[in-house]
Image (cartoon, rainbow, N blue to C red):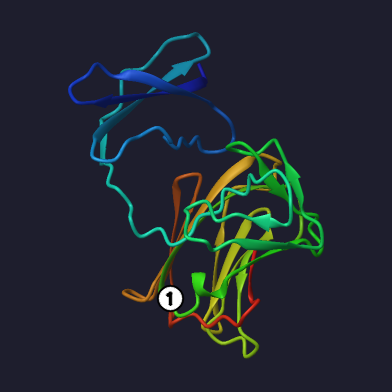
Amino acid sequence: SAISHYTVYRQTGGQTPKAIATLQNTNLQPAYIDTTVKPGRTYQYTVTATNNADLQSTASSAAGIAVQTVSACYAYWALNDSGGSVATESGGNGLNGQLFNGPLWNPSGKFGGALQFDGDDDRVQLPRSVLNGAKNVTVSLWIKTAKIGEQSLISGASRRYDNAFLLFLNSGVEMEFVTNNDSVSWEIDPVNDNQWHHVLVIASDANNAASLYIDGIFQGGRRLTIDPIEIDEGGLQL
């Protein structure tokens, strides 16, 4: 009998494993992001599968993770201000963004509110200092889109267009990253299904590579030369 759903269990501190999520079996590879973990703790996760006859498998081998406090987050925008023309930097670092051309505050975000773009000229301009000069960068985004064509996620560049930082969707099934006049891409499961998806890209000059995760699933690493990013004033935008 076909699999109906998966159940994710979590255990910490010698406690009995507790079911924390049920993932329906779809054509997409099921993924789960645990947003309730606490720094300084170690967690063990197992998964069971249940078929259409309601028969449950034994638990998978445990996967462990130790959660650390991340102190190097340079800037964070929740984009849930609910009104006005300023995107407040939620980390308290004063790196507020400025809205242009009328993106709309939407109360139905992934975590509270969200900012809705028209796919044409709506944008949020961020301080260039967020990425300018950086050569080891991690960018994390929650996106929800139904657009078929190309769409930018984050764009940072200078007038010379050298050592830019560009992350965009070529389509709903291809993500591209551009820097240092070079580009790499990934074929991905569709993300233009009008559902929320988590996108995380890591660019590092230590191994001259970029890595992509979609909904917590590693999409692969790509080799390319990464030099310090060059962004002009007004050149960093969502």
How many marks overall?
A: 1
> Which x, y percent locates residue 158?
61, 84
Front residue (pair 229, 85): 85
| Residue 218 appears anywhere in the view | yes
Q: Is residue 26 left or right of residue 172?
A: left
Q: Is residue 157 left or right of residue 2?
A: right
Q: Residue at x 54, y 61 (%)?
A: 186
Q: Quadrant of residue 119?
A: bottom right
Q: Quadrant of residue 96?
A: bottom right
Residue behind mark 1: 134
Q: Residue at x 52, y 20 (%)?
A: 2
Residue that extends furthest to the bottom in the rendered view of this protein: 160
> Which x, y percent locates residue 133?
45, 80
Q: Secondary structure at mark 1?
A: loop
Q: Residue at x 23, y 40 (%)?
A: 40
CA neighbours of label 1 inside 10 A, class few (<14), some (14 to 19), many (20+) = some
| Residue 152 appears anywhere in the view | no
For the residue marked with disc 1, what is the amino acid? Ala
Looking at the picture, does residue 221 appear above or below residue 71?
A: below
> Which x, y percent locates residue 146?
75, 47
Q: Quadrant of the C terminus?
A: bottom right
Looking at the picture, does residue 131 appear above or below residue 95?
A: below
> Which x, y percent locates residue 39?
29, 40
Looking at the picture, does residue 94 appear above or below residue 166?
A: above
